[in-house]
Amino acid sequence: MTKSSSNNDVLWNRGRENLLLVLSGPSGAGKDAVLNRLKKARFPIAHITTMTTRAKRPREKDGIDYNFVTKEQFQKLIDDNELLEWANVYGNFYGVPKQAVREALSAGKDTIIKTDVQGAATIKNILPQAIFIFLAPLKLQELIDRLTMRNTESEQNLKLRIETVKEEMTKIDMFDYVAVNEHGQIDRVVDEIKAIITAEKMRVIPREYIL
């Protein structure tokens, strides 16, 4: 005898799958500011901290802004194929550890990775089912002004970054969504990312990730 269904049976388990988001965009677009605002709002999403071999800047905190490691430690992760993506950026190495992503998803958490456009392209080749969000400035000059005001680069490196930004803006078609970070409107950007997450939770066929 088969068990009959009840009118009170749950027909749809909304939000049943964990999401993996990749937030990218050119340098100076405001990726860190957006993630920090999500943290302050206590939005329930795990943030994967990027590893880097570069020197820690003033006021940066290890394990929060970046995981600062030696070149030897970084190389071991490369050799063990334990980096989701990595790159040599202006002489420094940056990468996303696979294990941190595995642990976050296994713990039942929606997860977000911040990376540059080159890194997003690498992740897309490995995990095409991830959700890719491009953070763009309203105007290119706004972004150039942000980079200049940082005052953390030599004139030569600043010129290189600006040329890289122009190239990265041509890669926008690679992404699933675009969020425009207009000056003074960061809360609107955060709301748009929340809306993307809400929409993705309603997909009939959920995304799957294999690491």
Image: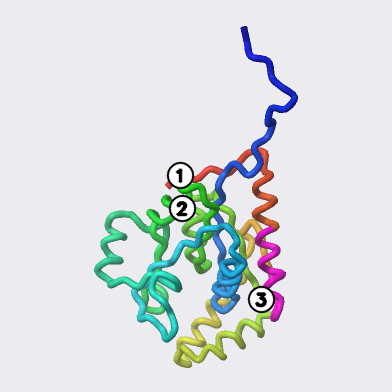
Quadrant the N terminus occupies: top right
39 is higher (above) or lower (below) than 91: above
- Kind of residue at badge 3: Pro
Cα separation, mark 2 vs mark 3, equals 30 Å
Element marked by disc 2: helix
Residue 167 seen in the current view: no
Cα separation, mark 2 vs mark 1, equals 13 Å
Give the quarter of the image for residue 177.
bottom right
Residue, disc 1: 210
Give the quarter of the image for residue 6.
top right
Residue, disc 2: 104
Q: Indicate which disc, 3 or 1, sits on the residue closer to the N terminus.
A: 3
- Kind of residue at badge 2: Ala
Camera-side residue of 138 and 60:
60
Residue, disc 3: 137
Give the quarter of the image for residue 187.
bottom right
